[in-house]
Image (cartoon, coloured by chain):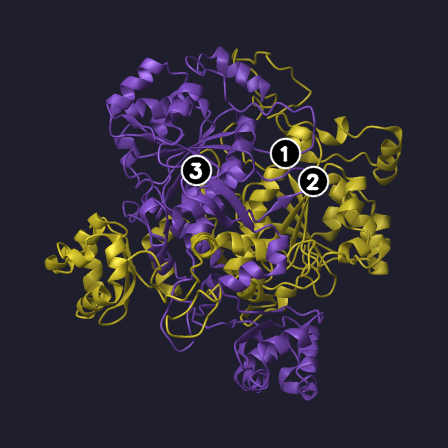
Chain colours: A purple, B yellow
Amino acid sequence: MLWSVAALRRSGLLCGRGGGRGLWTGRPKSETDNVKPLVGVKILDLTRVLAGPFATMNLGDLGAEVIKVERPGVGDDTRTWGPPFVGTESTYFLSVNRNKKSIAVNIKDPKGVKIVKELATVCDVFVENYVPGKLTAMGLGYEDVDKVAPHIVYCSITGYGHTGPMSQRAGYDAVASAISGMMHITGPEDGDPVRPGVAMTDLATGLYAYGAVMAGLIQRCKTGKGLFIDCNLLSSQVACLTQVAANYLIDQREGKRWGTAHGSIVPYQAFKTKDGHLVVGAGNNQQFATLCKILNLPELIDDSKYKTNHLRVQNRKELIKILSARFEEEMTATWLCLFEGCGIPYGPINNMKGVFADPQVLHNGLIMEMNHPAVGKISVPGPAVRYSKFKMSEARPPPLLGQHTTHILKEVLRYDDRTIGELLSAGVVTQHEAK
Amino acid sequence: MICINSHNKHSSGAQEAEVEASLNPRRLRPAWATQTCFKSQMKRGERGEGNELMLHPWRNTIETDNVKPLVGVKILDLTRVLAGPFATMNLGDLGAEVIKVERPGVGDDTRTWGPPFVGTESTYFLSVNRNKKSIAVNIKDPKGVKIVKELATVCDVFVENYVPGKLTAMGLGYEDVDKVAPHIVYCSITGYGHTGPMSQRAGYDAVASAISGMMHITGPEDGDPVRPGVAMTDLATGLYAYGAVMAGLIQRCKTGKGLFIDCNLLSSQVACLTQVAANYLIDQREGKRWGTAHGSIVPYQAFKTKDGHLVVGAGNNQQFATLCKILNLPELIDDSKYKTNHLRVQNRKELIKILSARFEEEMTATWLCLFEGCGIPYGPINNMKGVFADPQVLHNGLIMEMNHPAVGKISVPGPAVRYSKFKMSEARPPPLLGQHTTHILKEVLRYDDRTIGELLSAGVVTQHEAK
């Protein structure tokens, strides 16, 4: 993007401290190995809790530099969400904030707003999750930031969207999960709705945002300008309803709870074993036949009632009763043995211990260890995706509150020591003792 | 970002050029790679008619508004079921052209996953395959493999979800495709990963959800595990893939070469375990089921009302105070047992009992009224009817209508994210099996009619009657 940098310089938009420095130019490196896609991209991260931090963490894994802007004193709410805590840090916070720098700035103070705006001029991306209007009131809304940093990719993550009847409402995963229909369709068939065990609505939104930011960067390549992105929990979860929603929209079929089973595929569920559960999925006739062989129920294969998925769905109750009775006769370990190499998907219901002892999980590098300056060695779930031509970013620990304030003011904005001292004294910014 | 036409500038060597020429006699070029940031026709720094600086050579010929990021990107989509199709659908929403390669006769398995069906199409298939072109090719036939390889040379992205090794056996593994199309961003979506002890196992959402710990932590507190009501493991993987493909395209801009991407259900779901996993890894706290509640935040759950449920989240002390006021239980605000989240978690059972009793006294509609404008998150547990009648859902454009050539008007959930500078792709219906076979062979690969006729007769490809 050399031409675009030159153009921006000429137009006078890149000026002052840090002018031109740090703006992502995408200059090709000399070696083509281990070139992370987002090296050189600076992300100004005003998000808190889960969706936003999860998105920026994933972008950081691809090489982006994430500058986390936090409120002095408290910081990101989740720092206090526990137990469990390890030392002063909640595991909640540690789990989604690796590899970020923390600057503690009071954005209710106009001097703090000025700092954030200056950071925006040398960053590529601005991500926030304030209730619509709140940042505008402080002078950090899209229009404000766009004026000083027209190249910025401004990603807004809200509960329901930036406009519309619910746009002013605060959003949390559980509530969005409920309003968006996800909770209604999750739970035992004859029981009450439940939440997915981890905030999948927040996480889906975070993943949409992570992709959307890259889409924004690609688009900026074409137009030379930044843009505004509207991500929200409600839309993300509704979009993820996929066929459950389509069943309703197209066929007026209401959603319902299925326990571990599936509305349109039989058999596809957890079966109780002697000492636990086994989850099995037979999505086509071939797989169903294989299943029957393993269960030593060959008569089911040619039974006209179960010949196709459609028929199996129709005769679900009867078929599941037969299969369930058989599964209950053996221990989970026995079934795992009998199913090995069979070609159909199967597996136990692992608790966390089971997950992180699983050889494939370990092989995939899903335990990421790092040294935290305050609490020592910690482990968090590692990055999900791997690439052939580059390694994911090194495992750097989540920051302490304001751990990098001075560093950022000095190195990124090139403030002198005196100015930094004044801002610290006035409480506009704070610096953690550990650096 | 310097996005070089990798196909031109970075394939070097006479041998490679020869291979290229033999496989690509019609000199086809990947569209995106030629049209992104640099185009040769105009020089940087030139001034246009209005003396504006040429930031982008074709900036004067097209409007900068409504420039979709992935226009010109061609995606060769060999995926089936949910994770892959969901990923490519989202990329299509951003302007990419998605060419869905399907097996003649059956096509994507989910075409038959129902009821419900509408006409010949399952709603399952319709829900995640909008805006794609379908070419029906038999890739077990070497002639079919040749077609797919040729398509790869003119596409930017290759996405597949075969069990590791299966495509290699057919000559369509990464090494094979990389040879003829070194620019290709090859994204593989599997159950567990491309290597490792479980890599050969077929993957389904429910099984991955179970192995990855998701199922264990979902369900009533005193009941059995359940699945999330929609395949969130598949969908999270699809979203990771959608982002990863874009990361791959960005990276290609820097290096001029493609790469291989490993996405899998197991890793995606384990990565999404976030704090539940961290609780275990850092603090050795096992995961458990919480019904609608949360392990670390109280109150944060569904409460039974007289005629339904209300979900409420009070994540800090201020919100808790507000909640108590609305419930007319002000004495709780100063009660030392509930002053901080930490204390509320400790005294969870007692507090929830008090709050629950109060919630059960009124109808959901009354509570919705009382909670309005209060500043804390709250909402009903909507069924599908409730969701798609919700004014905000409608406002967000989450019902996407389109006309399907075989079944008429259908609606599916719309795109989740919106952008200020461009509209999402138009709503085009999911394709019938092989609906675009001839079109693609003719327009993209520039086969002549005779060759196409021969392939159709031999059954290497099939064409749907509706075009």
Residues indicated by labels 2 and 1 sit on the same polypeptide chain: yes
- Calculate the distance from the C-alpha at mark 3 to the C-alpha at mark 2: 36 Å
Quarter in which the N terminus of chain A is drawn = top right
Residues indicated by labels 1 and 3 sit on the same polypeptide chain: no
Question: Pointer 3: what residue?
Answer: A373
- Graded by Cα atoms within 10 Å as few (under 14), some (14 to 19) or many (20 or more), the crowding at tag 3 reads few
Place residue A142 in its image quadrant.
Answer: top left
Residue displayed at 71% across by 59% down: B163
Q: Is residue A258 above or below residue A403?
A: below
Numbered disc 3: what chain?
A
Amino acid on which the number 2 mark rests in the picture: Leu
Which residue is nearer to you in this view: B343 or A211?
A: B343
Q: Position of residue B196 (x, y in %)?
A: 68, 56
Amino acid on which the number 3 mark rests in the picture: Pro
Q: Is residue B83 above or below residue A102?
A: below
Place residue A290 in its image quadrant.
Answer: bottom right
Disc 2 + disc 1, Cβ < 8 Å: yes
Q: Position of residue B343 (x, y in %)?
A: 24, 56
Give the label on residue A350, or none: none
* Left or right, residue A248 beside residue A330: left
Q: Position of residue A189 (x, y in %)?
A: 43, 76
Numbered disc 1: what chain?
B
Question: Pointer 2: what residue?
Answer: B259
Q: Is residue B429 visible?
A: no
Question: Pointer 1: what residue?
Answer: B251
Q: Is residue B216 above or below residue B8?
A: below
SS state under label 2? strand
